């Protein structure tokens, strides 16, 4: 196990355990209850980057059914049972 790997946390919301959502290729997302005010308004996810590497990102509550914003820009999506990171898009003019 790599030295920087930290397993996902399990939270207890209103006394009930909420385990992380584990998906294919070693990706996971911590429970949405971590996004509420009493839990710090952020959660972690292990997502597949465009270069094919798995990295841990910090994200917040979902803004739509399909995407979750990531701290520092970009967003993650859950498609085909894999958590995938999408970097922020730059708008080029000219």
Image (spheres, helix red, strand yellow):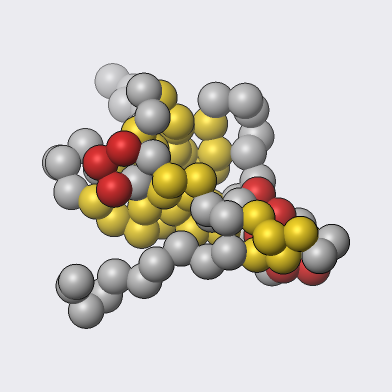
Q: Is residue 91 above or below residue 21?
A: above
**Foreground residue, 54 or 72?**
54
Residue 65 image-quadrant placement: top right
State left or right for residue 71 relative to residue 47. right
**Foreground residue, 12 or 30?**
12
State left or right for residue 2 relative to residue 40. left
Q: Residue at x 46, y 63 (%)?
A: 8
Instruction: Spot the residue most to the bottom.
Output: 3
Q: Residue at x 53, y 53 (%)?
A: 20
Q: Position of residue 61 (x, y in %)?
A: 65, 46
Q: Residue at x 69, y 60 (%)?
A: 17
Q: Quadrant of the N terminus?
A: bottom left
State left or right for residue 35 relative to residue 5. right
State left or right for residue 39 relative to residue 86. right
Q: Residue at x 45, y 32 (%)?
A: 77
Q: Position of residue 30 (x, y in %)?
A: 54, 54
Q: Position of residue 7 (x, y in %)?
A: 39, 67
């Amino acid at each position: 196990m790599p030295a920087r790997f930290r397993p996902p946390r399990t939270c207890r919301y209103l006394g009930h355990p909420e385990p992380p959502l584990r998906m294919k290729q070693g990706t996971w997302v911590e429970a949405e209850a971590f996004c509420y005010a009493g839990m710090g308004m952020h959660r972690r996810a292990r997502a597949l980057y465009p270069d094919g590497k798995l990295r841990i990102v910090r994200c917040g509550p979902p803004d739509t059914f399909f995407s979750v914003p990531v701290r520092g820009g970009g967003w993650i999506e859950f498609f085909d049972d894999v958590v995938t990171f999408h970097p922020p898009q730059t708008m080029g003019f000219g």
